Image (cartoon, grey):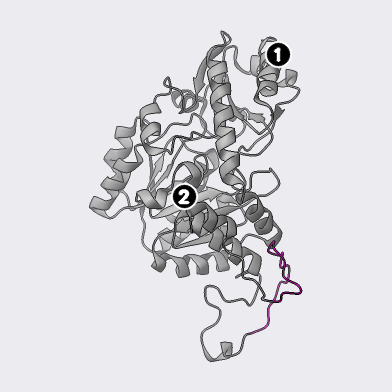
Amino acid sequence: MGWVTRWVRGGWRPSKDPAREPVVPPVSVSAIYVHPPGSFEREYPRVGDLKYGRENNPTVLGFEEALASLEEGRWALAFNSGMAALSTLVFYEIARGARRILLERLTYGSTRSLLEMVSSITGVEVRLAGPPWESLLDLVCWSDLVIVESMANPTLRVPPLSEVYGEARSCGARVVVDNTFATPVAYRPLEGGARYSLESLTKYISGHNDVVGGSISGGFDDDLEPLWNMRKIMGTIMQPIDAYLAWRGMKTLKPRFEAQSKAALEVAEWLESREKVKRVYYPGLPSHPDHELARKELNGLYGAVVSFEIGGGRGEVFRLLSRLKLVTPSPSFGGVETIISYPAISSHSNLDPVERAELGITEGLLRLSVGLEDVADVISDLSQALSAI
């Protein structure tokens, strides 16, 4: 079957009861399961076995099978948040010997906070680099583990991923790509050469601003069981209701992502024409510093997030936000509603103001996630809000 068919229809195990056969996979909320015949004669549980809800759940297992097809991976594991997925992966890699971690400097603020905390607890050395991307490439072979984003939060910088993989292969470093902004519709890290693809399922894959979740997908079977064991011990498995909602949302990911990418490009081009907008960050624009990289690495789609900078600092930002009527000030991105956030006081509030400015996260930078409303209505609302500043 084709790629989309596999993850839209995959993961469901019919009961073969023609009188009571649902088309939509049901939600299993039982916390415990009957020991199957023969389970007392071997080590139990193992990956895929059902015994206790902290280890596995039928709804979660079905979702993970479909998700692995989406990622073109050998396996996928679902977690109760994106940070839970990343935390579990980092501790697994440290347990298997990683002592030097390279983190893309322009990344989600909580990712950086996690690595700083882990470093202080374990003594593992963490270095930050890129952009400029040359500084990142120079340190790949210094590291045991490299963590990058396929599109960086919030200025949508796109690292030279193919070069990162090439450097990593030459020296045995393992690469983690947080693919949340691109999704597998635009980019599939495991096909390129990443060891792991990480997603915040909260964003595009669930797509409706009603789920918190995360995932890790991989292309090597020997990573699955130890990572599953780490998830079991840390208690970071996704809950069945969330897995059901994420699975349902994932089925419409491709048409949603394509429509939102098209709308976001239209909004980005409009913003770039406004006198009161100092700068627009969108990889689909020729003005973006990584436009050529994005054009080569991504699948002709650049996502729904557009960041733009206005003058006047926080006062003008707050004035603009207070005038919005349709666009909703809120965190997150990738949902069907258009929302806007202010990175300086949200996703990147933990950074020093000087470093924020160096990374382009100025006091006037706003991050817009374009939803599925009529794009003319989104532009009209932005226009009337911009007129107030």
Which residue type does callout 1 highlight? Gln
Is residue 279 left or right of 246 when viewed as pictured? left
- Residue 58: percent from the left, percent from the top? 64, 69
Foreground: disc 1 or disc 2: 1
Q: Nearer the viewer, residue 273 or 385?
A: 273
- Residue 127: percent from the left, percent from the top? 37, 42
Residue at (46%, 55%) from the top-left corner?
90
- Cα–Cα span, label 1 and label 2: 47 Å
Give the answer, above or below, for where 14 lies relative to 313: below
Is residue 379 left or right of 171 when viewed as pictured? right
Which residues are the magenta region? 17-35
Q: Nearer the viewer, residue 326 or 110?
A: 326
Secondary structure, magenta segment, majority class: loop
- Residue 247: percent from the left, percent from the top? 63, 55
| Disc 1: which residue | 384
Residue at (55%, 73%) from the top-left corner?
48
Residue at (60%, 28%) from the top-left corner?
368
Give the answer, above or below, for where 31 lies relative to 107: below
Do the residues under discs 1 and 2 have CB atoms within 8 angstroms? no
Which residue type does callout 2 highlight? Ser
Q: Quadrant of residue 232?
A: bottom right
Q: Does residue 257 appear anywhere in the picture?
A: yes
The verdict on residue 29 being magenta is yes
- Dot 1 or dot 2: first in sequence order is 2
| Disc 2: which residue | 120
Q: Does residue 290 appear anywhere in the picture?
A: no
Residue at (55%, 33%) from the top-left corner?
261
Give the class, few, some or many, for how many residues have Cα within 10 Å of label 1's Cα (few <14, many ≥20).
some
Q: What kind of element bears circle 1? A: helix
Is residue 183 left or right of 315 when viewed as pictured? left
Q: Residue furthest left?
A: 170
Q: Quadrant of residue 218?
A: bottom left
